[in-house]
């Protein structure tokens, strides 16, 4: 085993004495023989297994199943955004979630008083049930690269797994995601209401990733985003709205940067997941019905409008038929999640406040969908990448080839899906002229 990985495992034993006890001795790591689907993320490699250790009475024991998320070694040094993604995820697991947890536990036992942030474990905060257990992380920097390992609970051993498909989920899955998202966002409002200074201290270190990606791919959003508009024109629909959409597309990079960098002024801003897709949650099932879920992959977390996450749910995870049937119900489920904490939160946004946020934030979700939705709609990406570029990073593929590849992913299904998103936003008034000016 890599000496760095081994040192991290030993460190996990020492730091988690509430789980493993003290006076213990590291004996090795037993890797899992198989990994579930979706074991490796876009920006990380995964190792699954359990630590072998001897406790203070001399018994040989095994740790709970662990998932180690590791930085890819190949070419990793060249991509600053990847390292910051790991940094964001570590900060959320190591600081933001414990802050929310401590706040909730303290309030449950002593109310909002001078002991608000004391360390009490009398009650188990609900937020601890929403994410995998975090065991720790470690970073090692070389002259030309940086290695990072994040150690988490392996949820596959608790029967959590990815949804049957990567996008276009059914209402049962989406309603569970909406309710859980509302509950997660509610912690930000609770923290802001209780101690705004401490909340800001926990939100400020999170670094928006997308502005960095825009530097790597300037103008890409404008080109890729045109796919949905081309579909509208081909269908002879919403032709009068073409100038509005085209202007938003022409200013896509500017729109994204302004949105993500100015959200500290938004009274409804929360710590967002930032990448709230079906591929970043795990479900537990009774038969084929989802009955519980966990939120994972927090690399894109940032301070922003709650609609950033909610619009991903409604415009990337859901198809148009589902939006037509269940839009109101899914918004209601989100609002139910907002009000589901065991403590009272007075400063929650209303349903109308949430809808108003869509008017200035929804187009951002379209731009993200223009790039990523088609990736989620194809089974095997390797079949769609030109063979001579299979081993390349996306940023290494010539731009004209990259654009052509993304524009054709998922064929007519992908093109229609993006056109449907634009049509839905137009029908709901999210892309009218006044909204366009406010977004820009």
Image (spheres, rainbow, N blue to C red):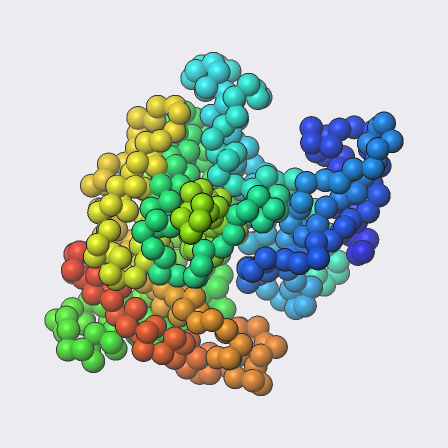
User: Residue 185 appears at what percent x and percent y?
Assistant: 39, 39
Nearer the observer, 26 or 8: 26
Residue drawn at x 75%, y 28% is 21
Rendered view: 175 above or below 238: above
**Residue 430 visible within the image:** no
User: Residue 167 appears at what percent x and percent y?
Assistant: 39, 61
Which residue sits furthest left?
240
User: Residue 332 appears at what percent x and percent y?
Assistant: 26, 41
Asked which quadrant contains residue 17, the reply is: top right
Residue drawn at x 50%, y 73% is 380
Q: Quadrant of the N terminus?
A: bottom right
Nearer the observer, 7 or 254: 7
Q: In which quarter of the image is the C terminus?
A: bottom left
**Residue 128 visible within the image:** yes
Badge count: 0
Residue drawn at x 39%, y 66% is 373
Rendered view: 405 above or below 54: below
């Amino acid at each position: 085993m890599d000496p760095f990985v081994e040192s991290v495992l030993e460190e996990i034993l020492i730091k988690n004495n509430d789980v493993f006890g003290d006076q213990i001795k590291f004996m090795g790591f037993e890797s899992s023989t198989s990994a579930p689907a979706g074991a490796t993320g876009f920006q990380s490699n995964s190792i699954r297994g359990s630590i072998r250790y001897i406790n203070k009475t001399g018994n040989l024991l095994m740790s709970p199943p662990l998932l180690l998320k590791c930085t890819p070694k190949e070419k990793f040094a060249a991509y600053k955004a990847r390292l910051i993604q790991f940094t964001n995820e570590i900060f959320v697991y190591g600081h933001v979630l414990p802050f929310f947890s401590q706040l909730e536990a303290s309030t449950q036992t002593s109310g909002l008083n001078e002991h608000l942030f004391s360390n009490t474990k009398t009650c188990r905060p609900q937020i601890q049930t929403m994410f995998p257990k975090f065991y720790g992380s470690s970073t090692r920097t070389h002259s030309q690269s940086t290695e990072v390992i994040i150690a988490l609970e392996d949820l596959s051993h608790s029967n959590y797994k990815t949804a049957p498909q990567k996008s276009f989920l059914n209402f049962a899955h989406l309603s569970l995601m909406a309710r859980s998202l509302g509950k997660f966002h509610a912690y930000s409002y609770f923290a802001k209401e209780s101690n705004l200074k401490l909340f800001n201290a926990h939100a400020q270190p999170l670094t928006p990733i997308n502005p960095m990606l825009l530097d790597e791919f300037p103008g890409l959003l404008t080109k890729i985003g045109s796919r949905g508009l081309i579909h509208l024109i081909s269908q002879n629909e919403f032709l009068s709205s073409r100038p509005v959409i085209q202007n938003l597309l022409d200013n896509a990079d500017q729109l994204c940067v302004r949105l993500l960098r100015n959200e500290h002024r938004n009274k409804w801003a929360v710590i967002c997941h930032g990448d709230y897709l079906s591929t970043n949650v795990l479900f537990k099932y009774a038969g084929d019905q989802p009955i519980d879920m966990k939120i994972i992959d927090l690399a894109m977390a940032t301070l922003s409008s709650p609609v950033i996450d909610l619009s991903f749910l409604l415009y990337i995870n859901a198809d148009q038929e589902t939006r037509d049937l269940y839009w109101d119900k899914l918004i209601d489920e989100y609002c139910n999640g907002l009000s589901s904490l065991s403590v009272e939160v007075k400063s929650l946004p209303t349903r109308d406040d949430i809808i108003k946020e869509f008017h200035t934030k929804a187009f951002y979700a379209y731009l993200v969908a223009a790039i990523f939705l088609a990736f989620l709609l194809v089974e095997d990406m390797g079949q769609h990448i030109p063979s001579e570029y299979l081993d390349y990073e996306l940023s290494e593929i010539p731009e004209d080839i990259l654009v052509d590849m993304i524009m054709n992913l998922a064929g007519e299904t992908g093109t229609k899906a993006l056109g449907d998103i634009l049509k839905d936003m137009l029908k709901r008034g999210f892309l009218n002229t006044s909204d366009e000016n406010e977004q820009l």
